[in-house]
């Protein structure tokens, strides 16, 4: 008599209720963890400030108290920036992976981040007094340039679009644009200005910058959530999506707009912070399943938490000196990327 066995599909079906409950837990209580993480980030620094002082500075601000000034001018904007950048990059990566059905897709790998930095380098070189508001729009345009180059190279290659080809094209475009940015920095003596963006970090963020970045991040997340159900269907395959009557062109356009808003805003304030958009979507899918209406908002919460914690680690690794946040995220992301490339590339 043959032994009964349970298929993988049956296991996945049994896991769905549990994963949905976990998703609702993340959505319901994730904000509590974010608030606690932000409070901890504000308290932590070269000079530790107790939580009582943090509380008083937020609700009973005293401009004559140096600790209150430090919190409002330096630490609170930094914590909010880490929250926004982490959420933006994570959601951007989720949308890219869902639309392209490519597990290696992320802003840092597919040339989106390097494209933003390339045009920002040109802006610094030829328009030294450029305003931050203008710099954000340039960052958006650069994100589009980087992504367009990657997909153009992949489309022109033999055999069409594959997971590894897209990753290789992204690596090539990233290397090219990074080299050109470095050359521009050396030629126009702006290497010091560009070094902050290449290191990646939120230590120098000012509250005046956040008023431009926060609306862009919020708009990008709203667009991503609005098309999340369509991305779920698209992740099953373009032919299936069309067969179900989905307007795939509209979904692609909306997804691209969301990615450009999220990545452009994140790069304009924090520079090159890699792998958040790669790692978080995979972790989120593992936790909550394959429904992008849950993946995208949960990715925003987990991405925000990751970057706030990474920024705290950057403060502590070599205190009182700052370690670039990009280096901290790379420690997590590089091994994860190599694992995915090997798995998807069939032993690459």
Image (cartoon, rainbow, N blue to C red):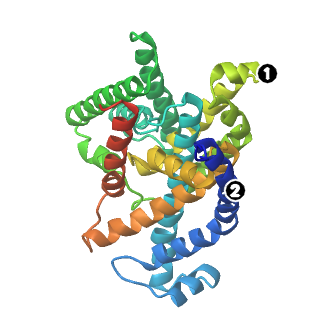
Asked if 134 appears above or below 320 in the picture, the reply is: above
Q: Nearer the viewer, mark 2 or mark 1?
A: 2
Residue 209 position, x and y percent, is 52, 54
Q: Which mark is residue 203?
A: none
Front in this rendered view, residue 124 or 23:
23
Q: Is residue 8 visible?
A: yes
Q: Secondary structure at mark 2?
A: helix
Identify residue for label 1: 245
Q: Which residue is at a point 63% across and 85% down the rendered structure image?
A: 60
Q: Looking at the image, do the residues carrying marks 2 and 1 touch, with CB atoms under 8 Å apart?
A: no
Label located before the other in sequence (2 or 1)? 2
Please name the residue shown 44% across and 66% down the image: 309
Q: Which residue is mark 2?
A: 20
> Can residue 133 be seen from the camera position used here?
no
Residue 110: image location, x then y, percent: 42, 32
Q: Is residue 107 left or right of residue 232?
A: left
Q: Position of residue 211 (x, y in %)?
A: 60, 54
Residue sitting at x 42%, y 21%: 149
Drawn side of residue 102 relative to residue 185, left or right:
right
């Amino acid at each position: 008599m043959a032994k009964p066995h349970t298929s993988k599909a049956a296991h996945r079906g049994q896991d769905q209720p549990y994963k949905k409950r976990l998703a609702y837990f993340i959505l319901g209580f994730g904000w509590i963890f974010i608030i606690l993480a932000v409070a901890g980030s504000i308290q932590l620094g070269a000079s530790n400030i107790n939580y009582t002082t943090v509380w008083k500075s937020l609700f009973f601000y005293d401009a004559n108290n140096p600790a209150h000034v430090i919190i409002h001018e330096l630490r609170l904007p930094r914590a909010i920036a880490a929250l926004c950048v982490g959420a933006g990059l994570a959601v951007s990566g989720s949308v890219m992976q869902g639309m392209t059905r490519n597990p290696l897709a992320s802003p840092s790998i597919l040339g989106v981040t390097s494209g933003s930095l390339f045009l920002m380098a040109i802006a610094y070189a030829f328009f030294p007094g450029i305003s931050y508001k203008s710099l954000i729009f340039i960052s958006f345009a650069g994100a589009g340039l980087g992504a367009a180059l990657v997909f153009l190279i992949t489309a022109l290659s033999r055999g069409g679009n594959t997971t590894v080809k897209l990753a290789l094209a992204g690596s090539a475009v990233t290397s090219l644009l990074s080299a050109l940015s470095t050359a521009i920095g050396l030629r126009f003596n702006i290497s010091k200005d560009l070094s902050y963006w290449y290191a990646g970090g939120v230590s120098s963020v000012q509250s005046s910058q956040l008023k431009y970045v926060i609306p862009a991040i919020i708009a990008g997340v709203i667009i991503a959530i609005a098309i999340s159900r369509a991305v779920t269907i698209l992740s099953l395959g373009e032919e299936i999506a069309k067969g179900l009557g989905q307007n795939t062109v509209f979904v692609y356009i909306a997804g691209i707009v969301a990615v450009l808003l999220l990545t452009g805003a994140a790069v304009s304030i924090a520079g090159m912070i890699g792998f958040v958009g790669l790692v978080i979507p995979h972790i989120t899918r593992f936790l909550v399943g394959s429904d992008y209406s849950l993946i995208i908002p949960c990715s925003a919460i987990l991405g925000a938490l990751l970057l706030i914690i990474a920024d705290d680690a950057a403060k502590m690794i070599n205190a009182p000196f700052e370690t670039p946040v990009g280096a901290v995220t790379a420690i997590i992301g590089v091994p994860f990327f190599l694992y995915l490339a090997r798995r998807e590339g069939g032993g690459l």
